[in-house]
Image (cartoon, coloured by chain):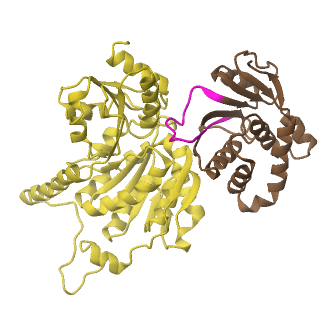
Chain colours: A brown, B yellow
Amino acid sequence: MKEEIIIAGFGGQGVLSMGKILAYSGVMQNMEVSWMPSYGPEMRGGTANVTVVLSDHRISSPILHTFDTAIILNQQSLDKFEPKVKPGGVLLYDSNGITRHPERDDINIYRIDATEEAARMKSTKTMNMIVLGGYLKIKPIVEMENVLKGLKKSLPERHHHLLPMNEKAIQRGKEIVLEVSLVT
Amino acid sequence: MSELRLMKGNEAIAEAAIRCGADGYFGYPITPQSEVMETLMALKPWETTGMVVLQAESEVASINMLYGGAGCGKRVMTSSSSPGISLMQEGLSYMAGAELPCLVVNVVRGGPGLGTIQPAQSDYFQAVKGGGHGDYKLIVLAPSSVQEMADFVELAFDLAFKYRNPAMILSDGMIGQMMEKVELKPQKKRWTNEDIDEMHPWATTGKKKDRERNIITSVELDSEKHEEANKRIQAKYKELQEKEVRYEAIDTDDAEYLLMAYGSSARISLAAKEILRAKGLKVGLLRPITLFPFPVKQLQNLTGQLKGILSVEMSSGQMVEDIRLAVEGKVRVEHFGRYGGVVHSPEEVANALEQKLTGGK
């Protein structure tokens, strides 16, 4: 098994930490993992993305140009990464702020209204965990038990009281993710 | 107890330094390696192992602090990125001349000048050919994973002290910034003063009554004597070349074409090798782990079976010169690489090998 994922959105949306939690979940499941952020003179409101690879075998390149899955949280990232999903791959996006929706018919497209749902749950900061839940529903490559371990490892101890809220957000994400169009 | 963690290459350097019992870190912040000192400051090793962590006023100061620490037989290190490493060249030359061990980590970014903060491998010449003035070399290790970032800290210190010569970990922004799974080794004790006296009798730890005073210097104005000092240093480099070459060979047994790459480029080349093998081309990968000493013999042993070698570097072509020197014209050697902060893709590397070596078959 090898899963190559790009997660992209605005800085501050929790893109990098979603990637880290996913990667740590992989570590807890004894997989090989890599987490490679775009780094640079970026700031809140700018774009942020991270490439995460989970594999049963040694990982070669941590920087990739095509992906099995793209998790997209803003329009710029959708424009940039929609063409880079491998045919038959997965594109999961949050429709908040999206004006041009995905158009490809050779990939599996899913939508998750995570920003809206996080606002409804009155915890906007867990938006990224709702998205993660949506992804894990589509591709259950790591056991929930290991996701929770990964989450615990990723959060500093002073934030451990937030674990139940994050778990709830992941569960909610699994419930609300929508199929838009699938490759038959 | 060893411990499994997910961490950045830069963080792994800091953790490994504390755990292997390093005595001191002296540095000045620069992207893309600032997490090394940030992690050390957060871990506060001065409260646990007694390791000193100090932000110096400049890179020039850092390297001279290393000279002082190393002169006392302490395991001292610094880290920086390309422009900062340039500032340290004078100090490194003095340390090589005075035969002082230390560890310098270069998390390379694109140059020349201030350049960019994105990854590059354009400091290869500076690292392996000396860098400062005079006839000297650094022991150069090139990690290609976060695990190797951690493991090479202790290895670099061991080699530096064994050969009394500065050692460098030549990394880049990609390995420094990426996170991978790392197994951290258990905490080791720092050397006591008695340990240092016993293991490193050259160190200036205070004159004992039963011996002459130790002098640490790179100056020798008597040319005949200075030639002898140079010969002693050169003999070490010969011994390093004979005994300390490290490399990884992947699918080279039946290889007709060879990708040669270190560090980040080796990771990308490994993916390129998989693409080319899937197309039926017999491609192997030779990854030098020590850049000095360079795996000359290991490369020469392969030349008989090879139709061509592609050196893959994030530079305009530096290691390719050492490959050409090693194969002595017996095999065609070409270079491919993006540079100035651009990282090549596995597909670009695979295409380059096909176009440059197989005639685009």
Determine which quarter of the picture holds residue A42.
Answer: top right
* Residue B64 as seen in the image, left or right of residue B97: right
Whether residue A85 is visible here, answered yes or no, is yes
Give the mark count.
0
Whether residue B61 is visible here, answered yes or no, is no
Specify the segment rendered in magenta.
A46-68
Residue at the limit of the structure toward the left, as seen here: B224
* Residue B192 as seen in the image, left or right of residue A78: left
Estimate the x, y position of residue A164 in percent, counting from the top left: 83, 55
- Identified at 84% across, 45% down, the residue is A171
Please say if B55 is above or below A93: below
The C terminus of chain B, quarter of image:
top left
Please say if B125 is above or below B165: above
- Identified at 42% across, 25% down, the residue is B277
Query: In the rendered structure, does residue B143 fall within the stretch colored magenta?
Result: no
Residue at the limit of the structure toward the bottom, as seen here: B209
Estimate the x, y position of residue A156 in percent, counting from the top left: 70, 58
* Residue A169 as seen in the image, left or right of residue A89: right
Please say if A101 is above or below A7: above
Determine which quarter of the picture holds residue A110.
Answer: top right
- Identified at 48% across, 27% down, the residue is B346
Query: In the rendered structure, does residue A49 fall within the stretch colored magenta?
Result: yes
* Residue A103 as seen in the image, left or right of residue B181: right
Nearer to the camera, B285 or A72: B285
